Amino acid sequence: MSHQDKPALVIMAAGMGSRFGGLKQIAPIGKKGEPILAFSLYDAQRAGFRKFVFVIKDEIYNDFRELVLSKIPAKYDVRVVFQRVGNIPSIYSVPEGRVKPWGTSHAILAAKPVLNGPFAVINSDDYYGPGAFGPVYEFLKKAKKGQYCMMAYNVANTLSENGGVTRGVCEVKKGLLTKVVETHEITKDSGLKPDTPVSMNLWGFTKDFLTALEKGLDPFLVKALHENPLKGEYLLPDSVSDQLKAGAATVAVLRTNDRWYGVTYKEDLAPVQATLRGFQESGLYPEDLFAGK
């Protein structure tokens, strides 16, 4: 596998953070004010990733450049692409009043021009834990066309104290994903077993998935423009499910016992800051996440 074809990491940072009420992608979390994605970059490079593709919105570019891009060592291959609401085939027009991006599958398509091999995908505003990235990287190094993977978390390790959360609840057979059910308003009282596997949008894909996403965009737009023009989203779990139904791919379900942390609600920010800064103080992470990589 050439350097060009080694697994890349795509970081989706174009979401609005509507419930959090701000740009949670760049909210200060680490001891030096680093955003949560600095922890993911540290863990990902430790696992072997050297190419990072950030999918962002034009409006946050200047802040993102100052807070993140300017601090990543030059030895890494860093690309920035923009997810734009107008970036759809010319036979369609953006509905009046639509400001929300077209979802996570559309975000990955924005990265297509700079991806030339297998790639992993994460959300920018989630903490995945030190054990999550290595198995995905190793899987992708050996994966052949149509062999995808996802990192599954125990649902009990992904909940918020401040309200219900949306999770992709996974059905698994013989280590392979059979179905992802987007489930809303999950709390510890929802009746799910604590070790129920859920997706936190940490996926691994071979390059052929990009072609599948392109093919799926038209039928998605036809349906969304008719049924939900202002908020319809082309989502990764749906795109993966379409591939599974078509028999075009398999998805190996990798498991971690790491706890996920994220800022779904404003009230989540302080406890997440305290926890991750505690990890820095204990030596799990360095005081300066961007130094000496």
Image: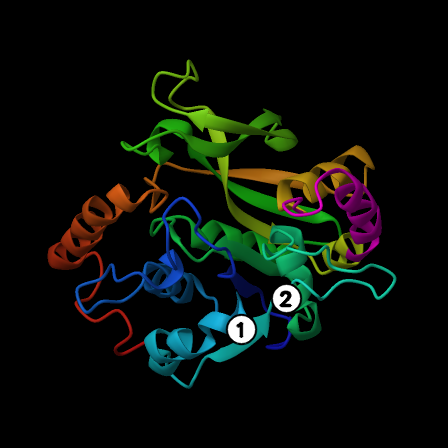
Q: Position of residue 246 (x, y in %)?
A: 83, 37
Q: Position of residue 97 (x, y in %)?
A: 64, 55
Q: Earlier in the sequence, mark 2 or mark 1?
A: 1
Tell me whether the residue at label 2 lies in contact with that at label 1, contact meaning CB atoms closer than 8 angstroms: yes
Quadrant of the drawing holding the C terminus: bottom left
Judged left or right of residue 241, residue 21 is left
Residue for badge 1: 58
Q: Nearer the viewer, residue 78 or 141?
A: 78
Q: Residue furthest left?
A: 281
Q: Amino acid at mark 2?
A: Arg
- Looking at the picture, the colour scheme in use is rainbow
Residue at x 46%, y 24% (from the top left corner): 196
Quadrant of the drawing holding the N terminus: bottom right
User: Does the rendering let one see residue 50?
Assistant: no
Q: Element at badge 1?
A: helix
Q: Residue furthest right?
A: 91
Q: Amino acid at mark 1?
A: Asp
Circle on res. 84: 2
Q: Position of residue 53 (x, y in %)?
A: 54, 70
Judged left or right of residue 126, residue 138 is right
Q: Residue furthest top?
A: 191
- Span shown in magenta: 214-233
Q: Position of residue 112 (x, y in %)?
A: 69, 67
